[in-house]
Amino acid sequence: MQKMITVNINNQEYEVQEDCNIVEACDAHNIPLQRFCYHRYLPVDGSCRTCMVEIETPQGMMVTTACTTKVKPGMAIYTNSEKAVAAQKSALEFLLLDHPLDCPICDKAGECLLQDNYFDFGRYDFRRTVARYFKGGKALNAGEHIVLDQERCILCRRCIRFFDEIVRTPELGIISRGHESSISLFPEKFIRNPYSGNSADICPVGALTLKEFRFKQRVWFLKKTKSICTQCARGCSIYIEHNKNTVWRFMPRENPALNRVWMCDRGRFSFNKLHEKRIFTPLKHQEEISFNQLYDDIAELLKTRRSGEIAWVVGPFSSNETYYALKTYCGDNAVCLMPPASGERDDLLMLAEEYPNAQGATFFGLQTETAPLIDKIQKGRIAALIIVEMDLFNLRNDSFAQCLMENIHKIPLKIYLTAYRDETVARVDYVVPVRTYAETNGTFINATSLLQKACQALVPEHPDIDAACIALYTIATGARKHQRRYSDASEMYDKLRSHYDELRSFQFNQIPEYGIALNMPKRADEPFKGIHVDFNVCSTAKPLEES
Amino acid sequence: MAVQFSEAALKEYEEIVTRYPDKKATLLPALWLAQREFGYVSDEVLEYIAQLVGMPAVKVYEVAEFYTMFHKKKPGKYHLQLCQTISCYLRGAEDLRSYIQETLQVLPGETSADGLFSFQLVECLGSCHTAPVIKINDEYYDSLTVEKLDAIIRHLKKNSSGEDHGV
Amino acid sequence: MEFELQLTKRFSIPNCHTLEVALNHGAYRSFEKLFSMKPEAIVNEVIASKLRGRGGAAFPTGLKWSFVPKDTALPVYLCVNADESEPGTFVDRYILEYDPHLLIEGIVCAAYAIKSHDVYVYIRGEYVRPYMIFKKALDEAYRSGFAGHNIKNSGYDVHIWIHRGAGAYICGEETALLESIEGKKGQPRIKPPFPAVEGLFGCPTIINNVKTISHIPWIIEHGGEAFARIGTSESTGTMLFGISGHVNNPGFWELPFGMRVPEFLEKYAQGVKGGSLKALFPGGTSTAVMTADECADLYLSYESMRAHGTMLGSGGLIVMNEHADMLHALRTITRFYAEESCGQCTPCREGTFWIHRLLEKMVRGEGTTKELDLLLEIADNMEGKTICALAAACAIPVRSCVVKFRQDFEKYVKPVFVPVAAAAEKMLGDDAVPF
């Protein structure tokens, strides 16, 4: 537990962590204080000189930067004294002095710290009466994802510190000096690190923007839904940002113990996949049918099978609710296949397991041993196979997938629950369209055993498209629509939580933002191994993206 | 890599490495050495130095751009560095500047067409009592007047047409 | 006035940069006493001498030395600041050229006092000749056992290395100097931690000016109290005063503190050239300008300068005669700071250049009275808001010039607002382009 001390901010006493700086102390109590170079998850820089406060020292009152000053017991701090405010205003004026003010063609408009801070703290009379100094080029190609605008840069060095200290691939620098200083890459070089997208997030102005997002949306129209990234077992906390039922970007969501406020490019730029190769209509032998006919047919076909003849195959891609439905309603013939962990990995966030919920399958005790099922298939004892949210026929070097392909003729009925039109779709008898994880509520357990929720961001294309867990429940129980126990996947969660001590006290909408740490063996090391950056996040501080 | 230090320069660099507990500290001496070896520090040279010193190229680039004495392009045979700070200004540096610009037809940052003279305006050279001062390559020429400078430049021009005796 | 020269005593001796000549004239004489004393005793002598740093900040040297943590397990570094770049300052170079062995002697004394074995001498890149001479002298000193291993059988090692700068005024700021040695851009560090605790390569480090270090042998030989008796009560010892600008005899002289400025002007600089005195910067351009009236009872001492609202700085006086135009002079001065700002802190990076552009505009005759007042406001917004003192070093001359010589500026400005119009896009084409 952090030791707390009392400081006096603007003539009021506050308890703050002993080792925090004044910006952090203000953040902990939501006392507004502007900043540019200071960033909660980066080393302190102290160069922008905007977080000016007045403090009492033995030598008298002193105006100084809050980010470089550690709190001391009893310290008197003023963020709103005449001198502090004057210093804040003048620092902003300096920053705006030669700024291009090309806001209408700037993709940062609406989430620009220069705009926001100016609105809150700035002086509104523009006093530059001399020629504007042009600080460099516009719309330069800085890499696969990044566009660089040198003249908008306010030289806060956030991106530089991020690449230097966190990713440890120094690629950006400030060249020249004085007023000629400008952000730059080495000539003819590009940003190549796999975390480049974060530099655009932390850029307080429009100096670094994302090619994938530029001029796609005005940010104030975007709605943010708390979710997670499903591209690897790390399960970084993210926001799905969407408008008119379309996802425009993924943004990392602050989670101090997990991804801090970063995410990899692999995850970030996977958002398009949510809209690609979607399937919205049920198929019977590749012919479109209605949802009514689909569920009637399946119920009819399965009714005549003994449960031992029905096999359920799922992958580590599904939600906990889906695993729970499998475990609860689908009998003992449910297997979870674990595809090989073959993705890129590093010590920061990326894990080789390119799927989000292997831990969930383990938590719910799903069988991962496939040999008995292979045996049954080979002997022709499986009459119906239900594949859940895994492109089974696209799996390479997997003994089960191999067996399936060789013995497919021995299984009379194959049903596939999927959101995407993938390879498996063409090989099955019935296709049950389900929702993507962005279209439903759900929970996932990441590699370090953190259970997080992913909330529904989008409305499915067709009202009859269900979440996989509900579709499974419907198929397994043969329930008609009006007979269903569940209308939303979150209800499935609320059902399952009662079985587990660690979850019992959290309803779906009460699951904490940072997740619930489960007491089970971890599948991976904690993130940011070997990267030491001091940061203090007081639990009362507003999340980054809201402050 | 195309550029590389000569054997002698490499040996010199190895000695420099022994002076510092951290190899990164050899960057400035290495850049000086490179400038002596190659005449100026091109991007290619910077990459070589980055590799030699064990630093990211962009950090070497930052440093080379920060200090005004590292040439990023080839300077003239005679690199004229005219001090324009207060004491030199008070004693006629502006006349020297006009003289250089007119007679040599070079603006600050430029090199004369014959490649003989490059011209750079610099800040205080630390010879204020002998103002105005110009530094040509490594030598100071002080207490100048336009006439004195004219004689020096004529001399340099003459020198360069015959055998090179430097300055 | 009777006094003994400390820094320049051998300057007039031909070839004194060679060890042989220097030794014949008393170089390294302090070593005998030095190594018979305890380091702490030397620090105490320096404290007693009341020697203050000659680089400009005038911080008490002995006190600075005493900040090095006792019995630290880390190596202690000594850095000698020979990055002399303040406009009007030019004397350190002559110590390097004329009497390098005095500096080496001082380095060994200072290193011994702070228990340092590793010394870097940071010489500004432009000083090629001083560097060559000093390097040669250092080689000689090494060969003859005055530096390096087991100096004169004392059992004490002092390794001295030269680190050349490459053109950056800011590297004279002590933490920027450390950054520069470490192979980085010369951008000052945030303090605390102070270098005496966490400096070069993260180790305790003392940074002293060439002149400061060169006083140490004398203090060791004669004692701190003898030093303290020279000069005035707050400004002890001698100082190398340089003078440039509009004077008949620009140059430098070693004098005890306390001489009246007009006396110095007449006796040494032989009077103002080209007219009567108009303005004087007492210690480089970073100090507040003095009017002729103010100079009348201004003395060459820290306390007198402070009482007049200025500073002695590095002791480089710059003189302007009655025909000098303060707008043009100030424009020249601010260009220096705009060019030399490291670009790290916003107020300095933007403020120095903004001020300079406003002055350029006034020189073109396009300025307004409002902009004249704006200059003062910008100066206020820069000073004390940055990591190092460069912003203040620009703000101080701006404020003092505009306030004290306002009529000079008013000649150029119009009371009405002049739209920037097309001229606005005119770039500052005449700025120094780094090659």
Image (cartoon, coloured by chain):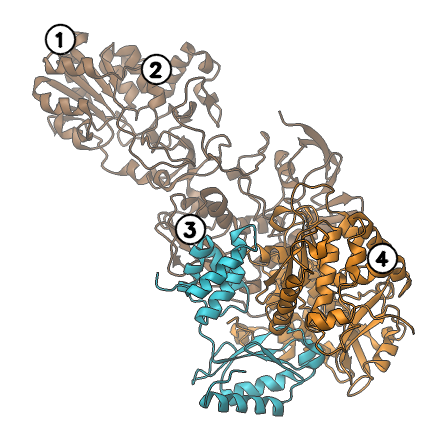
Label 3 marks which chain's residue? Answer: A
**Quadrant of the rendered structure where residue C246 is?**
bottom right
Chain C, chosen colour in render: orange
- From the viewer's perspective, is C43 left or right of C366? right
The nearer-to-camera label among 4 and 3 is 4
CA separation in Å, label 1 and label 3:
58 Å
Where is C66 relative to A456, above or below?
below
Q: Which chain is cyan?
A: B
**Quadrant of the rendered structure where residue A446 is?**
top left
Are discs 4 and 2 both within one chain? no
**Residue A209 marker:** 3
Where is C202 relative to A322, above or below?
below
Q: Where is mark 1, residue-wise?
A: A304
CA separation in Å, label 3 and label 2:
42 Å
Contact flag, marks 4 and 2 (Cβ < 8 Å) = no
Q: Amino acid at mark 3?
A: Thr
Chain A, chosen colour in render: brown
User: In the image, residue B95 lies at what x, y percent?
Assistant: 62, 87
Are discs 1 and 4 both within one chain? no
Are discs 4 and 3 both within one chain? no
- From the viewer's perspective, is A463 left or right of A137? left
* Dot 1 crowding, Cα within 10 Å, few <14, some 14–19, many 20+: few
Q: Where is mark 2, residue-wise?
A: A364
**Residue A77 marker:** none
Q: Earlier in the sequence, mark 1 or mark 2?
A: 1
Q: Earlier in the sequence, mark 1 or mark 3?
A: 3
Contact flag, marks 1 and 2 (Cβ < 8 Å) = no
Q: Amino acid at mark 2?
A: Phe
Label 4 marks which chain's residue? Answer: C
